[in-house]
Image (cartoon, rainbow, N blue to C red):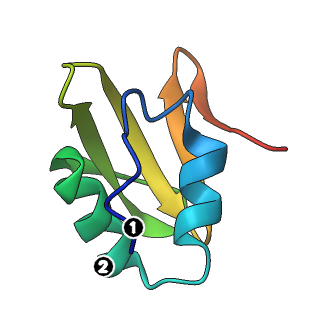
Amino acid sequence: MSDAFHLLDLPSQALAVQRLLRGRPEDEKLAWLAAHGRVVPLDSHFRRDRPVYRFESRLGLACVFLIDGDELAFLCDHGFYRVKS
């Protein structure tokens, strides 16, 4: 996977990240994210028992997300949202 990608803010760059990681297993997606920031599993699960994570970029911008297939879903005030093209 490319190291040339500069991940500054996961929610605002979600479409590009999803395209870059499309088709890869979840453990590879998490490893890529961890190489571009900090990924911490949370003591929480969401639909279909999906694990939930906190991501913090190297700039300190943080979000809570889960991986659903090739899409990232982000926690907001009333649930999760997905970034779609």
Location of residue 28 by image quarter: bottom left
Up-down relation of residue 20 to residue 74 (above or below):
below
Q: Quadrant of the N terminus?
A: bottom left
Q: Is mark 1 on a helix, strand or loop?
A: loop
For the view shown, which residue lies furthest in the right direction?
85
Q: Mark 2 points at which residue?
A: 27
Q: Where's residue 29, x and y in %?
A: 38, 69
Horizontal side, residue 61 vs residue 80: left or right:
left
Q: Which residue is drawn at 27% across and 48% down?
A: 44
Residue of label 1:
2
Q: Which amino acid does label 2 sit on?
A: Asp
Horizontal and vertical percent position of residue 63: 35, 28
Mark closer to the chain start, 2 or 1: 1
Q: Which amino acid does label 1 sit on?
A: Ser
**Which residue occupies the foreground of this view, 44 or 26?**
26
Seen in the picture, residue 44 relative to 9 is either above or below; the reply is below
The residue sitting at 41% across, 27% down in the picture is 9
User: In what element is the residue under mark 2?
Assistant: helix
- The foreground one among 53 and 77 is 53
Please tell me which residue lies in front, 69 or 35: 35
